[in-house]
Image (cartoon, helix red, strand yellow):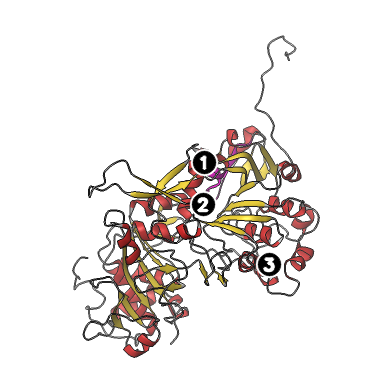
């Protein structure tokens, strides 16, 4: 991770506040931070709010990020097509490691194991069939992965996921250092908080809570014990310039459709 | 054969044109069938509908799944599904696939999206497996006790010999894909943004069938597009059928947009008491022509796209 550049860092530059930051704005700026230091790779945030976060990172501190538009085109900030990335070629990108994906999770455990395939004890006759394993196995073993959870709840943050699709740090450790050398779950951002796995045993840690959210609220909404180290700070508040930029990058307010409050 | 002048007549590659019903007549119960396209994008739905009209059963499907999988599951045609996802894209979860899974009505082999690619590639290259990291440490091994790893014979950068997933070849008895322009010998052109995995499905199959929006003379293949749009070569094709609108209701630009309204109608039908029989009675007449008559070409029913 590179150090923050005060000139372009959205959290530290100063400008008049045109409006108050809303919850979705905290989520977007916290998610944008996951791309810091990534350089010239494919930023692949999946979903409306993560896509705004990727655009924010590219517009401010990671200008070299590649970005997908209309599924298969690599496009610059002005929307101009600069590359073609059909689905088959996507696996060349994934397996080369030149990608950072932000996925969703139907279930996530303390080590970052993710399930988006099916819910219930019997995987051959699930109580609730979801999408399937999708690309989660290949993503998590090959390049950095972050997660966006729009509703932080004990149904998502569970003691044990029903199916491990994306692998967490305990599974990666079992594989050994060589096999898992490209595994990295960088950050989890939810509508309540920012979490990561930068603990000695890679258990999930509460990094910050969004302004207006109590730590106890996050603990209640998490089905396992989170690591808390000292004072948990509030998630940095985006300043006026960042808010103005967000309104420009997301004029239709897609980010507000995903987050309550 | 000789020409009137006595010189040998020039021969053309054989004509492989066939009807959709002719293709389905060549399929057999219990076959493993690969279906091209992706989610609700350029699926060979005219052939899927023809299979729905047939007595075929006990099929194993290999698909980046969309309504093709949902409809065949709903109609009880599927014994086993090999899949990484099934989605309508504009509607995240495929309703009839969900019903089949939650009823325990179909067998499954679940894969990562890239593992499916490698399984097809292994079959295409006549290899028993291809190695990958995708799948390591996941519950794919718990779901499929037959899945194996392979140890690298070469030392890695840290000195160890890596264990990799050995994705077994996905041999297909038959593959079906929907293209844009084909000639009668089976050469095919695609004019949209993404060929998906269609050529690979054909390469992995023993019997290879394509449908197309337009069947054109050999000289007219590149009247639209240029050589970069040639997606399928005739040595990968055993039969070619023309089915205008044959991808409906899935995405098929530049010919047809995705029919979002109809996908919603299809998804909603799963929640009604009549369910699939109700949908089939209302929307699946006895002929493809009658089906297409319900959806006049050129009517814009929605062009939404969603991230893959």
Q: Earlier in the sequence, mark 1 or mark 2?
A: 1
Chain bearing mark 1: B
On whether residue B271 falls in the magenta region, the answer is no
Q: CA distance from mark 3 to mark 1?
A: 34 Å
Do the numbered discs 3 and 1 sit on residues whose CB atoms are within 8 Å?
no
In the rendered view of the protein, which quadrant contains the N terminus of chain B? Answer: top right
Position of residue B291 measured from the top left corner of the image (x, y, whole percent): 76, 57
Label 3: which residue?
B266
What is the span of residues highlighted in magenta in the rendered image? B186-201
Does the residue at mark 1 contact the one at mark 2 (Cβ under 8 Å)?
no
Residue occupying image coordinates x 72% and y 9%: B6
Residue found at x 72% / y 74%:
B272
Identify residue for label 2.
B193
Dot 1 and dot 2 within a common chain: yes
Question: For this rendering, which residue is in front, A115 or B217?
Answer: A115
The quarter of the displayed image where residue A152 is located? bottom left
Residue A49 picture location, percent across and down? 42, 73
As for residue B197 lying within the magenta part, the answer is: yes
Q: Is residue B293 above or below residue A169?
A: above
SS state under label 2: loop
In the depicted structure, whether residue B283 falls above or below residue B236: below
């Amino acid at each position: 991770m590179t150090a923050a550049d005060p000139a372009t860092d959205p959290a530290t530059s100063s400008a008049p506040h045109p409006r108050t930051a809303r919850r979705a704005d905290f989520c977007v700026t916290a998610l944008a931070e996951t791309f810091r230091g990534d350089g010239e790779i494919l930023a692949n945030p999946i979903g409306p709010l993560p896509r705004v976060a990727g655009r924010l990172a590219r517009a401010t501190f990671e200008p070299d990020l590649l970005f997908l538009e209309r599924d298969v085109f690599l496009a610059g900030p002005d929307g101009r097509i600069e590359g073609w990335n059909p689905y088959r070629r996507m696996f060349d990108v994934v397996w080369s490691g030149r990608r950072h994906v932000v996925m969703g999770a139907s279930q996530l455990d303390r080590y970052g194991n993710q399930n988006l395939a099916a819910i219930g004890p019997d995987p051959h006759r699930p109580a609730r069939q979801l999408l399937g394993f999708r690309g989660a196995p290949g993503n998590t073993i090959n390049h950095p992965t972050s997660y966006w959870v729009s509703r932080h709840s004990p149904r998502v943050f569970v003691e044990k996921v029903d199916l491990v699709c994306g692998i967490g740090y305990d599974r990666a450790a079992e594989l050994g250092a060589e096999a898992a050398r490209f595994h990295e779950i960088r950050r989890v951002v939810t509508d309540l908080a920012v979490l990561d796995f930068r603990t000695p045993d890679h258990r999930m840690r509460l990094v910050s809570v969004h302004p207006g959210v109590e730590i106890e609220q996050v603990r209640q909404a998490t089905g396992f014990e989170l690591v808390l180290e000292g004072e948990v700070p509030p998630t940095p508040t985006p300043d006026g310039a960042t808010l103005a930029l967000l309104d420009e990058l997301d004029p239709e307010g897609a980010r507000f459709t995903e987050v309550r409050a | 054969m000789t020409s009137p002048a006595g010189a040998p007549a020039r021969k053309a590659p054989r004509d492989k044109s066939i009807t959709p019903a002719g293709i389905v007549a060549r399929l057999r119960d219990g076959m493993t069938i690969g279906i091209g396209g992706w989610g609700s994008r350029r699926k060979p739905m005219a052939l899927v509908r023809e299979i729905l009209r047939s007595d075929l059963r006990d099929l194993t499907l290999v698909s980046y799944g969309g309504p093709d999988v949902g409809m065949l599951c709903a109609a009880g045609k599927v014994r086993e599904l090999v899949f990484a996802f099934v989605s309508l894209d504009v509607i995240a979860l495929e309703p009839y696939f969900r019903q089949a899974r939650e009823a325990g009505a179909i067998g499954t082999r679940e894969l990562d999206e890239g593992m499916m690619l490698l399984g097809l590639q292994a079959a295409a290259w006549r290899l028993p497996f291809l190695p990958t990291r995708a799948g390591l440490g996941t519950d794919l091994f718990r779901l499929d006790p037959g899945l194996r790893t392979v140890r690298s014979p070469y030392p890695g950068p840290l000195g160890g010999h890596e264990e990799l997933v050995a994705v077994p070849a996905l041999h297909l008895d038959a593959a079906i894909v929907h293209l844009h322009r084909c000639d009668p010998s089976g050469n095919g052109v695609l004019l949209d943004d993404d060929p998906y995995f269609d050529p690979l499905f054909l390469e992995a199959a023993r019997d290879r069938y394509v449908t197309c929006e337009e069947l054109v003379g050999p000289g007219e293949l590149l009247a639209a597009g240029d050589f970069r749009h040639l997606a399928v070569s005739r040595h990968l094709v055993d039969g070619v059928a023309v089915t205008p609108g044959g991808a409906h209701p899935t995405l098929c630009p530049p010919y047809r947009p995705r029919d979002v309204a109809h996908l919603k109608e299809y998804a909603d039908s799963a929640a009604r008491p009549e369910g699939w029989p109700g949908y089939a009675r209302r929307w699946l007449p006895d002929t493809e022509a009658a089906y297409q008559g319900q959806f006049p070409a050129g009517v814009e029913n929605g062009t939404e796209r969603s991230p893959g």
